[in-house]
Image (cartoon, rainbow, N blue to C red):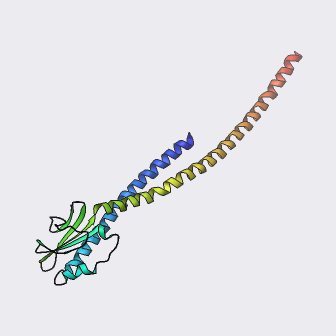
């Protein structure tokens, strides 16, 4: 019971700490992803002028390409260029800053001339997948460490219990010896009387 209680307390504290750490890591990952979107939009805005049509020609073919999308809108209404993962309609109705729209986290920015609207987006599902991977990696040590902790506690508790029982046996034997001596003397006196 002592070991089960200790393991329950340790597991509860560990799970609470893991949940808190996961939430903090998820928040930091969201901040990092948002910063990446803003930086990408700023880079695209720098090239949004005459070279906008060439941007699409130099895109790498990567398995994460479907999770990230961008669009360059001339005047905010005519789609000039977009990535393969981007739809033909605007990623977000917002013209400035961050927004969430149709499964995308979108950052919208106008270029320096105010002629081109740049929208860069990342799939919400991709972000959730990263969060789940973080959670799994944080909880994996718990799955391994908790049985090891149980084994260590069992060995420690068993050794302490064995030592306590031995001390109790010695005390009982000493107390019995001390009680037998006066009783033996009294019995002898009773027989003599």
| Residue at 50 percent of width and 57 percent of height | 141
Q: Horizontal and vertical percent for residue 185?
A: 84, 24
Note whether 185 is above or below 169 in the view shown: above
Say whether residue 183 is left or right of residue 117: right
Dividing the image into 4 quarters, which one contains the C terminus? top right
Q: Position of residue 7 (x, y in %)?
A: 52, 46
Above or below, 87 relative to 10? below
Q: Position of residue 58 (x, y in %)?
A: 28, 81
Looking at the image, residue 69 lies above or below residue 164: below
Residue that extends furthest to the top in the rendered view of this protein: 193
Classify residue 110 as left or right of residue 43: left
Q: Residue furthest bottom?
A: 50
Return the residue nearer the eye: 37 or 191: 37
- Percent across and percent down for residue 128 are 33, 59
User: In which quadrant will I find the N terminus?
Assistant: top right
Residue 92 in sight in this render: yes
* Residue 47 visible somewhere in the drawing: no
Marks counted in the figure total 0
Residue drawn where x is 12% and y is 80% of the image: 113
Image quadrant in which you'd find residue 63: bottom left
């Amino acid at each position: 019971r002592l070991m089960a209680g200790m393991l329950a307390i340790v597991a509860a504290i560990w799970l609470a700490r893991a949940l808190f750490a996961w939430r903090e890591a998820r928040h930091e990952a969201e901040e990092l992803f948002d910063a990446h979107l803003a930086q990408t939009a700023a880079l695209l805005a720098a090239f949004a002028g005459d070279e906008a049509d060439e941007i699409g020609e130099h895109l790498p073919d990567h398995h994460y390409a479907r999770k990230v999308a961008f669009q360059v809108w001339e005047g905010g209404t005519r789609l000039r260029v977009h990535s393969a993962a981007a739809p033909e309609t605007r990623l977000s109705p917002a013209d400035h800053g961050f927004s969430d729209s149709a499964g995308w986290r979108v950052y919208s920015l106008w270029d320096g001339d105010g002629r081109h609207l740049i929208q860069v987006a990342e799939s919400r599902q991709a972000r959730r997948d990263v969060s789940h991977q973080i959670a799994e990696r944080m909880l994996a040590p718990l799955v391994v460490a908790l049985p090891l902790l149980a084994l260590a506690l069992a060995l420690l508790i068993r050794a302490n219990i064995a030592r306590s029982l031995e001390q109790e046996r010695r005390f009982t034997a000493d107390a019995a010896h001390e009680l037998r001596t006066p009783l033996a003397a009294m019995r002898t006196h009773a027989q003599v009387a």
